[in-house]
Image (spheres, helix red, strand yellow):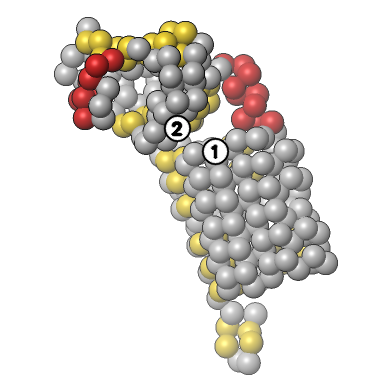
């Protein structure tokens, strides 16, 4: 808790990264920050206790560690990029209420992750945040798409596709490489469209929108006017 009489409040960048024999970590109350890559590639680290005083967990903080479960502190508001990417033994995660953003690749490549709880406070989820997990695969296999809190994260489409009215945001890369998608209808409910959503959609020939909608103006602004069908 103290080093040379001073209280420890931060675990520094890469402080314990590549500590192959580290198996258990219990952080004391008073820790505020776990900086980027603090425990990255700790291949034997299976147990971590994080106090509720922690407000920040940095990018790749626990990437490629062996943690089996973790209780995230209530005070964090962001899950940064790659925070738990490659933690192959993690089977479930509960995102605390109050978190607003889950970063790119945050939980990518967790091959044991079957249960995920995401609160309504989350309004942004980065690309591939849950890719290569059983939870992600189940959503795609069951519905053909993954949507959370009105955000369409990913869809796999053959032919024509109508986005559900429950969707308000199309996230970055949502339709990336859907080379067999021929048309898409975007409802009035959509008020935000991310980057590169139709990249490599080589068969897409029509984007169907309602006159005066956000989607219509987005299509015009982003060079899709030649594919625009206004109804």
The one of 99 and 86 positioned closer to us in this rendering: 86
Residue highlighted by disc 2: 173
Which one is in front, 100 or 169?
169
Q: CA distance from mark 1 to mark 2?
A: 9 Å
On residue 23, which mark appears? none
Q: Characterize the local packing of mark 1: few (<14), some (14-19) or many (20 or more) Cα atoms within 10 angstroms.
A: many
Where residue 104 sits: x, y (%)? Answer: 51, 45
Q: Residues within 10 Å of mark 2 (few under 14, many from 20)?
A: many
Where residue 138 sits: x, y (%)? 65, 24
Q: Which residue is mark 1?
A: 128
32 relative to 226, above or below:
below
> In this rendering, would 117 be left or right of 90?
left
- Residue closer to the observer: 102 or 26: 102
- Looking at the image, tell me whether mark 1 or mark 2 is earlier in sequence order: 1
Instruction: Classify the position of the C terminus by image quarter.
Output: top left
Give the residue furthest to the bottom.
4
What residue do we see at 73% from left, 66% from top?
18
x, y percent for residue 152: 44, 27
**Secondary structure beneath disc 1?**
loop
Q: Secondary structure at mark 2?
A: loop
* Residue at 63% from the left image edge and 18% from the top image edge: 141
Which one is nearer the viewer's eye here, 174 or 98? Answer: 174
Residue 135 appears in the picture as rendered:
yes
Residue 202, x across and y down, in percent? 43, 19
Q: Are marks 1 and 2 in contact (CB under 8 Å)?
A: yes
User: Is residue 150 visible to us here?
Assistant: no
Vertically, is 121 above or below 61?
Answer: above
């Amino acid at each position: 808790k103290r080093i040379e009489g001073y209280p420890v409040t931060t675990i520094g960048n890469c402080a314990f990264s590549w500590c192959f024999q580290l198996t258990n970590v219990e952080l004391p109350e008073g820790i505020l920050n776990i900086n980027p890559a603090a425990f990255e590639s700790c291949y034997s680290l299976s147990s971590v206790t994080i106090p509720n005083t922690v407000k920040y967990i940095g990018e790749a903080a626990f990437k490629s560690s062996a943690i089996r479960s973790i209780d995230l502190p209530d005070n964090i508001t962001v899950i940064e990029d790659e925070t738990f990417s490659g933690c192959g033994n993690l089977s479930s995660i509960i995102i605390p209420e109050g978190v607003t953003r889950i970063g790119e690749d945050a939980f990518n490549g967790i091959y044991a992750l079957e249960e995920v709880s995401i609160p309504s406070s989350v309004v942004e989820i980065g690309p591939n945040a849950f890719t290569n997990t059983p939870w992600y695969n189940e959503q795609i296999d069951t519905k053909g798409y993954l949507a959370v809190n009105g955000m369409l994260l990913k869809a796999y489409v053959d032919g024509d596709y109508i986005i559900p009215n429950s969707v308000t945001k199309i996230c970055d890369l949502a339709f990336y490489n859907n080379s067999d998608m021929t048309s898409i209808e975007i409802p009035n409910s959509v008020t935000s469209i991310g980057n590169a959503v139709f990249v490599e959609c080589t068969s897409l020939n029509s984007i169907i929108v309602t006159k005066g909608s956000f989607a219509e103006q987005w299509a015009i602004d982003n060079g899709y006017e030649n594919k625009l069908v206004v109804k």
